[in-house]
Image (cartoon, grey):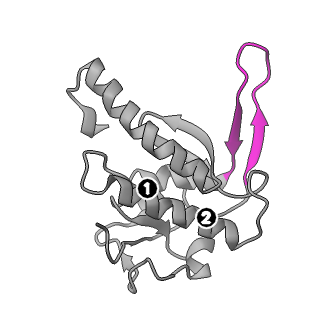
Amino acid sequence: SKTIRGYSNAQIKKYLDDYYEKVIPLIYKHGGEIEKLMGDGIICVFGKPFLDLESPSYVYKAEECAEEVIREFYGSDKHVKVAIHKGLVNYYKVPGEHYGEYTIIGQPITDLYRLESVSMPNAINFYSNSTYDRLGWLWSVFSDEIVTCKGFDANGLQGVDFTEIKYMTFKDIT
């Protein structure tokens, strides 16, 4: 990432150690399951089979986690970007005895990868007219106004069917 450009190996290790020591426990505290770590990026799932909750309860868990992570790192050298998306995904076990990993596949994962690349920092980012947007998740910790990202046309994102991105910021971030 641009944040660690020019860092020595020791500085990168310290940066990531500090980040992971704080963020991973927060994800598990709220019932999330980490699917993939990619540098300082994390894809995690809130829902079945890891959380035995129905909609919208697992969505609230993801939002609560997002809020806590953003508040934890606000004002630090860790630039947190959160993207929430909802949809059906499939788990796949990579075959073979030498590489034992499960991975998640599905359009929501592709959409999340694309969304993260253009997300606003210190906010919850989501696609306009997505299932998440249509559910209208505006509870008390979020600002009363959902702001459409200015100057951004999601049509330029390869493999994504959405045309616009929105983001929610917090009333009191400190």
| Circle 1 residue | 69
Position above or below: 106 against 167: above
Q: Residue at x 32, y 37 (%)?
A: 1
Q: Residue at x 45, y 60 (%)?
A: 68
Residue 70 drawn at (x, y percent): 39, 58
> Is 23 on the left or on the right of 3, as rendered?
right
**Which comes before the other along the chain, label 1 or label 2?**
2
Q: Is residue 157 visible?
A: no
Quadrant (top left/top right/bottom left/bottom right) for the C terminus: bottom left
Give, as a single range, the part of the protein colored magenta. 89-106
Disc 1 is placed on an element classified as helix
Disc 2 is placed on an element classified as helix
Position above or below: 131 against 33: below
Density class for disc 1 (Cα within 10 Å; few <14, some 14-19, many ≥20) is: many
In front of the other: 139 or 145: 139
Residue 8 drawn at (x, y percent): 24, 20
The amino acid at mark 2 is Lys
Q: Residue furthest bottom?
A: 144
The amino acid at mark 1 is Val
Residue 36 lies in the magenta-colored region? no
Residue 92: give its label: none
Residue 108: name its quadrant: bottom right
Residue 131: name its quadrant: bottom right
Residue 96 lies in the magenta-colored region? yes
Residue 61: give its label: 2
Residue 36 drawn at (x, y percent): 58, 38
Density class for disc 2 (Cα within 10 Å; few <14, some 14-19, many ≥20) is: many
